[in-house]
Amino acid sequence: MNENREKWGSRSGFILAMVGSAIGLGNIWRFPTVVGQSGGGAFILLYLLIIFGIGIPLMIGELAIGRRGKSNIVATFKKINPKGKWWITGVIGVTSGFVILSFYSVISGWVMAYIVKFISGEFNNLDTQEISHTYESLVSHPSVPLFWHGLFMVMVISIVMLGIHKGIEKTSKILMPILFAILLILVFRSITLEGAAEGIKWLFKPDWSLITIPTILSALGQVFFSLSLGMGTIITYGSYLNDSENIPYNSVIIAFSDVFIAIISAVVIIPAVFAYGVQPDVGMPLIFITLPLIFGALPLGNFFGTLFFILLLIASLTSGISLLQVVVAYFTETFKWSKKKASIITGFITFLMGIPSSLSTGLLENYTIFGEPILDFMDSLSSRILLPVGGLLTALFIGWVWKPKSTIEEMQKQDNKVPLGRQWSFVVKFILPVVLSYIIISGFF
Ligand code: TRP
């Protein structure tokens, strides 16, 4: 065992880093978009059900193996099961880290470009068409988005390089409170808009007819992405966790904060959308076209617009570092690279991997993979295949190889009573594998 391995400095540091990983573009951009497309209240209820029934049980298992292994994800699977081939799950995780971060960083780059546009007042008094044009000319530009993508990666690298304690934990402790404060200001602004009530009503009124198999699948995918499950992020963060921490209790706090922020983000966005008579189901352009239109029409719109995109940037930065940390932990421990070397090299590779995604909204617009532009393909590849496969293998490993008994033992290090232990075992052994296999199979069609 490596005695010098880093640990979280404090409980709040661990929780804020986990919440920082969980809260990202997935909550603030993707969740309101999916809710807008999949029928308000009913989707939210379904989402909650999946978070509590499936998301939290897997998070508990991932934290437990992480803490037991106290290593990067590949070594953790090897340590627990030296003879088997389960370490491949870790390899898939490291690969997914590169893939997800590469396109995540491209979108985060657009977010940074938008902050500058808002500050400079570029969106003042523009109509929808003009804003669409601004968006199109940004994302289709061959080099400007690459500059922002590169800058985002430089920020991620500079934080991860400093290590768990001085880098990730400290950044999360500073940035997460700012994120909550900004969100509070924006919620207040949105719900006091004239006509916002209709949006709130729509958001919480369940329309069950919209709950179809594809909606359920998208809710499942969203839960995985939003809680950072199935990729080794949680295992990695769990590996720095003290034995005195209560795993189930912390998991509930983290998942609950994540859902709460997702719903609050929908409360920021949807009423504003209704107040301005725009449809909530437009999908991706909602954030980059509809919102600037709305902010442009508000008094102090530039201020609120800037705040909103800073919020997005903070959210994506704390998620970005959690993605790179998985990769960096693997490279430092496997090849004995320094943190600095590992962060710079893997961060640079991620930057290179993001270039095709960045160009796919411009120069490479007509180039598709399985019928999708590269950026969308990377997104689908991760949320439909890589994360569910990673999640499935992890669940099978926890449920059938390591056995629920060991997870429960790991949890008992802190407290002898483990509530709902039997129900938890059932979910991990049976429900998770069935649901995840179903997601994977349907992902191919
Ligand atoms: N959870 C983040 C979001 O909601 C993204 C993210 C960070 C992630 N780490 C991850 C997604 C690991 C999947 C796996 O935006």
Image (cartoon, helix red, strand yellow):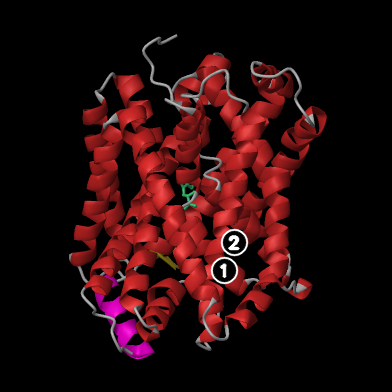
Q: Are marks 2 and 1 in contact (CB under 8 Å)?
A: yes
Residue 281 belongs to the span the image colors magenta:
no
Dividing the picture into quadrants, the one containing residue 404 is top right
Q: State the residue in front, 197 or 199.
A: 197
Q: Where is residue 43 in the image (x, y as percent from the top left)?
A: 68, 65
In x, y percent, where is residue 254? 57, 42
Residue type, mark 2 in image: Ile
Occupied quadrant, residue 363: bottom left
Residue 409 shows up from this direction: yes
Q: Between 201 and 111, which is closer to the camera in this rendering?
A: 201
Q: Is the magenta stretch mostly helix, strand or loop?
A: helix
Does residue 104 lie above or below 424 as drawn? below
Separation (CA) of disc 2 from disc 1: 6 Å
Q: Which of 114 and 297 is in front in this view?
A: 297
Quarter of the rendering occupied by the C terminus: bottom right
User: Does residue 180 appear left or right of residue 32 in this picture?
Assistant: left
Residue 44, given in percent of the width and then of the height, sits at: 68, 62
Residue 132 included in the magenta stretch of the image:
yes
Residue indicated by mark 2? 263
Q: Name the residue under label 1.
A: 267
Q: What element carries label 1?
A: helix
Q: Quadrant of residue 116?
A: bottom left
**Is residue 140 shown to the viewer in this render?**
no
Magenta-highlighted residues = 127-139
* Quadrant occupied by the N terminus: top left
- Mark 2 Cα-neighbour bin, 10 Å: few <14, some 14–19, many ≥20: some
- Kind of residue sitting beneath label 1: Val
Mark 1 crowd level (few <14, some 14–19, many ≥20, 10 Å Cα): many
Q: Is residue 420 above or below residue 443?
A: above
Residue located 48% across and 32% down the image: 14
Image position of 55 with respect to 62: above or below: below
